[in-house]
Image (cartoon, helix red, strand yellow):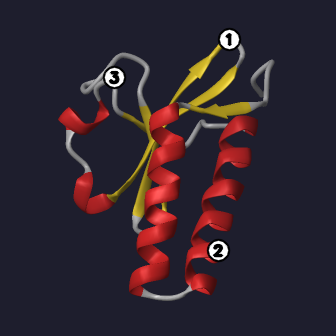
């Protein structure tokens, strides 16, 4: 288990979550949006505890990893102070250029 099991969101990840919440509310319902954000939040906590099964995306950027949640992908990096959540993108948006920072 990692020494530090905390997580934090980049500015871009915070913006991604706000956008997916708003879009899901508009397309489906408030309940669907809340459920999606809850599932993503649970995934953040699990990744902070262990990320052993996450997909290695080092071919895109060194140390980058990915974890699927519903139809979204969480992109993150394990750092000394915890898991840095970089982006939360719909699977249709998965493209290396979107992950640059």
What crowding class fits label 1: few (fewer than 14 Cα within 10 Å), some (14-19), or many (20 or more)?
A: few
Whole-percent x, y for residue 40 in the image: 60, 58
Element type at mark 2? helix
Q: Quadrant of residue 53?
A: top right
Q: Residue furthest top?
A: 80
45 left or right, relative to 69: right
Q: Describe residue 91's horizontal placement relative to residue 21 as left or right.
A: left
| Position above or below: 9 against 25 | above
Q: CA distance from mark 1 to mark 2?
A: 31 Å
Q: Is residue 61 visible?
A: yes
* Neighbour tally class for label 2: few under 14, some 14-19, many 20 plus, Cα within 10 Å: some
Q: Upstream in the sequence, badge 1 or badge 2?
A: 2
x, y (%) of residue 54? 50, 42
Judged from the image, the secondary structure of the residue bearing numbered disc 3 is loop
Quadrant in the rendering for residue 56: top left
The earlier-in-sequence mark between 3 and 2 is 2
Whether residue 70 can be seen here: no
Q: Where is residue 45 shown, x and y percent of the image?
A: 74, 46
Mark 1 falls on what kind of element? loop
> Marks 1 and 3, Cα distance to the nearest angstrom?
19 Å
First in sequence: mark 1 vs mark 3:
1
Q: Which residue is mark 1?
A: 80
Query: According to the image, label 3 marks what residue?
Result: 101
Q: Which residue is mark 2?
A: 34
Q: Residue at x 68, y 11 (%)?
A: 80
Residue at screen point 64% across, 76% down: 35
């Amino acid at each position: 288990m990692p020494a530090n099991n905390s997580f934090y969101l980049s500015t871009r990840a915070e913006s991604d979550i706000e956008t997916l919440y708003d879009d899901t509310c508009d397309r489906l319902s408030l309940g669907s949006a809340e459920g999606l954000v809850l599932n993503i939040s649970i995934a953040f906590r699990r990744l902070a505890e262990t990320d052993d099964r996450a997909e290695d995306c080092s071919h895109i950027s060194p140390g980058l990893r990915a974890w699927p949640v519903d139809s979204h992908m969480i992109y993150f990096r394990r750092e000394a102070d915890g898991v840095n959540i970089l982006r939360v993108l719909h699977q249709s948006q998965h493209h290396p250029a979107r992950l640059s920072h």
